[in-house]
Amino acid sequence: MRAFEIVYEDNDIVVVDKSAGINTIKPRHSTNNLILFDFLYEKYGELFLVHRLDRDTSGLIIFAKNQESQSNLSGQFIDHRINKTYYAFVDGRLEFENTYLIDVPIMIVPGKYKVSIHEKGKPSQTKIRVVENYKNFTMLEAKLLTGRTHQIRIHLNYIGYPLIIDRLYGHRTEFYLSEIKKKYHLKKDMEELPLVKRQTLHAHSMELEHPATGEKMTFNSELPKDLRALRKQLMKHG
């Protein structure tokens, strides 16, 4: 997949499917990486931020082309009328038949781009559902009922099932096939490369009302190549 792909646009909105490793907006520290907002701003001349995706989360993100659309979409987020659903690959085997609600408040850690669970934090709710079980891992569907910073990541860590890869809240920065494949051997003088080296989270679905027409719209993004490879190996060896 390319760095990003425009999946829909009209006079009011732009929906983008981005790869992992792409910043939505310029981070505090300097970077030479592609900034999605800046690139689209140059393309369209005017653009308004509605929400964000973490640099290492792939999938769907929407931008507004005018202030009226931005205000409308922001209102839909506040009123929980925009449904965003993610695929998450997590440590541990979760087994439950129905959906499970994680309902704990989140607070931003002062001076750091990080959050924590705290009773004085903002109310935060994430609904999760098992998609597939593997031996020691699980593929989940996570639906945001609120939209806090790092919400899915900290909520999954809180219940004891962090993302397989999460530099802030998990146990790994890379995942290797040798961790799950029995009798894994490399040829002499060869170094094992990671199967995945970014957080295992993908924004795969978004449902909203068009800000100008009120039309119900649904967008979907399939798992990218690296997460498809991870899923395949977890099914085969896990």
Image: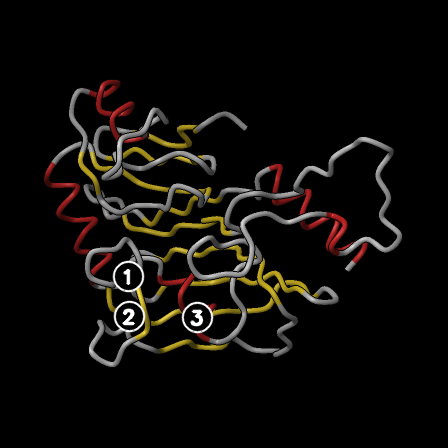
- Which of the 4 quarters of the picture holds residue 155? bottom left
Image coordinates for residue 37, horizontal then vertical, percent: 26, 31
Numbered circle sitting on residue 148? 1
Name of the residue lying farthest toward the front: 189
- Which of the 4 quarters of the picture holds residue 39? top left
Image coordinates for residue 21, horizontal then vertical, percent: 44, 36
Q: Which label lies toward us, 1 or 3? A: 1
- Element type where label 2 sits in the image: strand
In the displayed structure image, the side of residue 103 where residue 179 appears, left or right: right
Question: Mark 3 or mark 1, which is nearer the start of the sequence?
Answer: 3
> Which residue occupies 49% across, 48% down?
202
Say above or below: 117 vs 55. below
Say above or below: 99 vs 132. below
Name of the residue lying farthest toward the left: 67
Distance in Å between CA atoms under marks 1 and 3: 14 Å
The amino acid marked with disc number 3 is: Lys
Whether pointer 1 and pointer 2 mark residues with C-beta atoms closer than 8 Å, the reply is yes
Q: Front-most of 83 and 166?
A: 166
In the displayed structure image, the side of residue 61 where residue 41 appears, left or right: left
The amino acid marked with disc number 1 is: Arg
**How crowded is the residue under tag 2: few (<14 C-alpha within 10 Å), some, or many (20+)?**
many
Distance in Å between CA atoms under marks 1 and 2: 7 Å
**How crowded is the residue under tag 3: few (<14 C-alpha within 10 Å), some, or many (20+)?**
some
The residue beneath circle 3 is 127
Whether pointer 1 and pointer 3 mark residues with C-beta atoms closer than 8 Å, the reply is no
Q: Which label lies toward us, 1 or 2? A: 2
The residue beneath circle 2 is 106
In the displayed structure image, the side of residue 224 where residue 229 appears, left or right: right
Q: Which label lies toward us, 3 or 2? A: 2
Image coordinates for residue 148, horizontal then vertical, percent: 28, 61
Distance in Å between CA atoms under marks 3 and 2: 15 Å
